[in-house]
Image (spheres, rainbow, N blue to C red):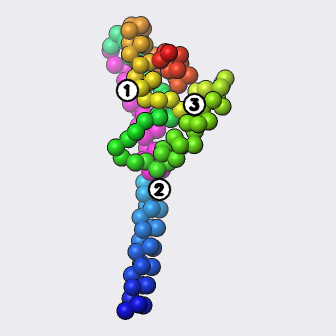
Amino acid sequence: VVVVVVVVLVVVVVVEEEEKEEEEVEEEEERVGMIKVKGEIEEAVSKLKYNSIGVFRPSLLLSHRPKLRVGEFIAQKLLKPLSFLFAGSMKKYRPIPAHRVAKAMLNKALEEQPGFYTVENDQLFKLSE
């Protein structure tokens, strides 16, 4: 009986490790695919016939998600306290709270800028002040 229990525990541990590896691969594939899709969507949206189209490019969003993304969670925990290090040309990589992105989007919309434009992360900080 003891041998059976040990074997079952070993099998469970191996299966859990395989599931973790599969999840990590899926997350990486999702991230790479998402970057490609973002580019395709941005290109398609730029061709639409609207008076004003803005594309906002925040860096790492600091927020709570209903679905835990391990890599994002770790990045938030590590980078949030180090945000002050992202100055100068590195400011475009500085993590930004989601509410500041929303505020920047609203402020930019109120400017009524015509045409297609992009707003990078460092500009989001300025627009959300």
Q: Nearer the viewer, residue 115 or 55?
A: 55
Q: CA distance from mark 1 to mark 3?
A: 28 Å
Q: CA distance from mark 1 to mark 2?
A: 30 Å
Q: Which mark sits nearer the N-terminus, 3 or 2?
A: 2
User: x, y percentage for residue 124?
Assistant: 50, 20
| Secondary structure found at label 3 | loop
Q: Which mark sits nearer the N-terminus, 1 or 3?
A: 1
Part of the protein shown in magenta: 27-49
Amino acid type at circle 1 is Ala
User: x, y percentage for residue 94?
Assistant: 57, 30
Looking at the rendered image, the disc whose residue lies closer to the viewer, 1 or 2, is 2
Q: Which mark is residue 44?
A: 1
Confirm whether residue 57 shows in the render. Answer: yes
Q: Which residue is mark 2?
A: 24
Amino acid type at circle 3 is Arg
Q: Which mark is residue 94?
A: 3
Q: Residues within 10 Å of mark 2 (few under 14, many from 20)?
A: some
Q: Residue at x 44, y 24 (%)?
A: 101
Looking at the rendered image, the disc whose residue lies closer to the viewer, 1 or 3, is 3
Q: Which quarter of the figure is the N terminus placed in?
A: bottom left
Q: Nearer the viewer, residue 107 or 120?
A: 107
Q: Is residue 62 magenta?
A: no
User: x, y percentage for residue 102?
Assistant: 40, 23
Q: Residues within 10 Å of mark 1 (few under 14, many from 20)?
A: few
| Left or right: residue 110 compared with residue 21 | left
Q: Residues within 10 Å of mark 3 (few under 14, many from 20)?
A: many
